[in-house]
Image: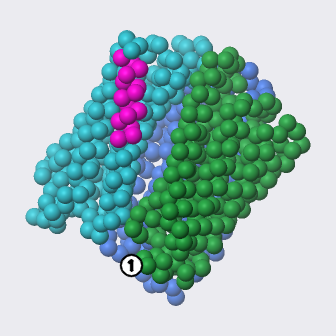
Chain colours: A blue, B cyan, C green
Amino acid sequence: MSFLQFLVPKDKKFFPLFEKATENLLRTSEALIVLTTTTSAEERKQRIREIEHLEHSGDNITHLIFNQLGKSFITPFDREDIHALASAIDDVLDFIHGSAKRIDLYRIEQLDESIPALARCIHDGAVELNVAIKNLNGMKDVNLVKEACVKINSLENEADDVFNKAIANLFDNEKDAIQIIKIKEILAALETATDKCEDAANVIQGIVLKQA
Amino acid sequence: MSFLQFLVPKDKKFFPLFEKATENLLRTSEALIVLTTTTSAEERKQRIREIEHLEHSGDNITHLIFNQLGKSFITPFDREDIHALASAIDDVLDFIHGSAKRIDLYRIEQLDESIPALARCIHDGAVELNVAIKNLNGMKDVNLVKEACVKINSLENEADDVFNKAIANLFDNEKDAIQIIKIKEILAALETATDKCEDAANVIQGIVLKQA
Amino acid sequence: MSFLQFLVPKDKKFFPLFEKATENLLRTSEALIVLTTTTSAEERKQRIREIEHLEHSGDNITHLIFNQLGKSFITPFDREDIHALASAIDDVLDFIHGSAKRIDLYRIEQLDESIPALARCIHDGAVELNVAIKNLNGMKDVNLVKEACVKINSLENEADDVFNKAIANLFDNEKDAIQIIKIKEILAALETATDKCEDAANVIQGIVLKQA
């Protein structure tokens, strides 16, 4: 039994908050999928409002984690890893929110198929992050944690390919510079969300490694 | 009397530097207001030069704080908070400088009213940061510190609204893509400056919380 | 003899990895110079593939440093400095890779002379970083370390000037907004690479200072 397995069952402070954070992220990524696939303007508006609301909830959870960190002498894993993990999850949320805000602000009517494809990568990453966090708690199942992190890494590569092809396509086919500015920025925000998801997975892999 | 109240009066190293940093920021934000409201090309040139100069001074102050951190065994608050606070103040300065540089480089003659409005948000945030730092020293007046941080948070929200409306406006009314590229980037740099100001306020709120 | 001089000869873990990291960076910057100066489409393609490959190698080295950090109780210099230095070197690499990817994706045929000029600044910075790391090991020659850092700082200033002039030029002479979007982004990625190089130098200067 590792040090962590011994300690973590006593920790009821950080893991519940991290689970809240990844569940909140999961709901946000579900709203993003609906937002990027619906054809109803009303539905779209509602999903944008929902994402805004979930982003605020995420901010609150992040603050709770930081406050807990400020008050705790003993933490289930390294303080800097707690900080980095909470920040990375918060960043995924921020970039989902950023892309949703731009879809709204730029009054994009018709979304290129690369946009729901990236939304799907983000959502799949959020599912895996949630699995990783749940099985990291008390080192329940280290293999499941590792597998989830590997999947997140390959999702990031997939998102990269989707993004690169979409950008090449955009410059090949779209002749309206203003439209290029708008679409490029939405694609970049979505792709960065998958980068941040990978950052979170990297922190988790580091935590697992230290316990090996 | 908290631990901080006991320790801080003896610390003559960090707070004077942080006060210098926020006073330097305050002067920079004043120059930004003049730069974004004047109609005189000569005045504008002078303010850009002044902001460049103040940005260098800010860099020096940040280096002094980091060097002090490297040499000090005892610090008035957590080392990572000192680092994060100094970096956030430096970032506000960098984004003010970045926007001023772009106004110059892009040869923008007529500035949309959203630009001085954002400059005003940054300046008001700098005033509050200065109040917060002065009253954090020795935990003089915790309530004043908290109030200042709340104000900075609402200024960031206000800046967000100004930014969103300005971007929507820009895409609705400006048909020249090159002009859109230029204005959008200046607006984004200014809005990011208010984000960084909020980052600084969040660090300060965390410091106060740990002493509660 | 400083504490570091005493300790470092025993450390065979971090410095070899940092040397690998800067040598990998050096090779990447050499490929960037060829990429930005060649007129052969075939050569260009090969250099882009090479940079992609070197970026992966760099990622692996960064992971090895982080893993080593997780396992080590004693480190040749402060943990946060090891983390910051490895991250900054990795960032230089990422931005070189980002600019190469864009040259490819955007199908840029003819590169403005400012682009190889920035590549040269990045390469010269990589040379100096390599010198700094080699002489930091065991505090072999502190003056060489300091000189290298000063050179990196002035290279960043030079890159800034090249960038600013190139952007002003671009907006003065290029009337195609789509072309402006493309070139501006490549220039920005290159200029940010020199910023990250300066970040690495700043961390090194901090390490030297703490040993003074």
Whether B206 is drawn above or below C167: the answer is below
Where's the C terminus of chain A, which quadrant?
bottom right
Left/right placement of residue B134 relative to residue A167 reads left
Q: Position of residue A6 (x, y in %)?
A: 45, 84
Residue B28: x percent and y percent? 33, 32
Q: Looking at this view, is B211 or C191 the one in front?
A: C191
What is the secondary structure assignment of the residue under circle 1?
Answer: helix
State the predominant SS element of the stretch in magenta.
helix
- Between C202 and A56, the one lying in front of the other is C202
Q: Nearer the viewer, residue A204 or C109?
A: C109
Q: Residues within 10 Å of mark 1 (few under 14, many from 20)?
A: few
Within the image, what quadrant is residue A198 found in?
Answer: bottom right
Query: What residue would you read off at disc 1?
Result: A10
The residue segment tinted magenta is B43-57
Residue C30 visible to the viewer: yes
Q: Give the image quarter of residue C165.
A: top right
Left or right? Give the position of A97 relative to B175.
Answer: left
> Can you give x and y, in whole percent of width and height, for residue A181 in the image?
63, 27
- At 53% across and 68% down in the image, what residue appears? C141
Write the residue at 55% across / 81% down: C9
Q: Residue at the location (46% across, 59% down)? A: C205
Q: Position of residue B134 (x, y in %)?
A: 18, 47
Quick check: can you spot residue C185? no
**Is C34 placed left or right of A115 in the picture?**
right
Q: In the rendered structure, does residue B168 fall within the stretch colored magenta? A: no
Name the residue located 50 percent from the left edge and 75 percent from the top edge: C76
Choose top left, top right, bottom left or bottom right for residue B22.
Answer: top left
The chain letter under disc 1 is A
Q: Nearer the viewer, residue C40 or A106?
A: C40
The stretch drawn in magenta includes residue B52: yes
